[in-house]
Amino acid sequence: MKKEKQTYHSFVEDNQKFMQCKKCYQYTKTSEDSVAVTCELCITIININNYPDSLPKNITSSGNPPGWHFMKEFVDTDGNVFHKGKDQPKLKGTLKPTVIKPKIKTKKKKVNADAEMFKQAKAYKKKQIEKRKARK
């Protein structure tokens, strides 16, 4: 038995063919020779539903510091030499491993609006006291 082809409702308006989507039956512009169509919204929904499956299951770190592939020259602990992330096998073992200095994180003291206002008020009072002393 042959499987019957399903035909979707279509119409032509201003020399442009419109056809119903296979999933949601919304009308979509198509070319003259199209047989079936899936609208943009249904494609987006399909891609969103399939997105988690396309992610790699196990993401492993290379063991190199972040941004090593942007460095002009990087030598890992095995002696492999990389120029801007590209391996240079001829130079393997000729250079010392690159020493990465850890970033020093400095905490900035957060000053809220009230503390700033009190600081200004204290400075103003101090200035007023000095003015009074200068008058005497």
Image: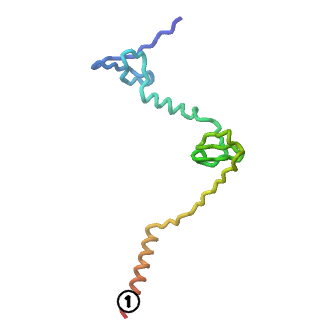
The residue lying furthest to the bottom in this view is 136
Occupied quadrant, residue 101: bottom right
Q: Is mark 1 on a helix, strand or loop?
A: helix
Give the residue displayed 69% in from the left and 50% down from the top.
97
Residue 24 location (% of width, % of height): 43, 25
Q: Quadrant of the C terminus?
A: bottom left
Front one among 92 and 32: 92
Amino acid under label 1?
Answer: Arg
What color scheme is it?
A: rainbow
Residue 53 location (% of width, % of height): 58, 32
Q: Is residue 103 left or right of residue 37?
A: right
Residue located beneath label 1 in the image:
132
Occupied quadrant, residue 57: top right
Q: How crowded is mark 1: few (under 14 residues within 10 Å), some or many (20 or more)?
A: few
Give the residue displayed 44% in from the left and 71% down from the top.
116
Residue 73 location (% of width, % of height): 61, 47
Q: From the viewer's perspective, is residue 121 above or below residue 57?
A: below
Number of numbered discs visible in the structure rendering: 1
The residue lying furthest to the left in this view is 14
Front one among 54 and 19: 54
Give the residue displayed 42% in from the left and 28% down from the top.
40
Occupied quadrant, residue 126: bottom left
Front one among 129 and 114: 129
Residue 64 location (% of width, % of height): 65, 46
Give the residue displayed 42% in from the left and 75% down from the top.
120
Q: From the viewer's perspective, is residue 72 above or below residue 134?
A: above
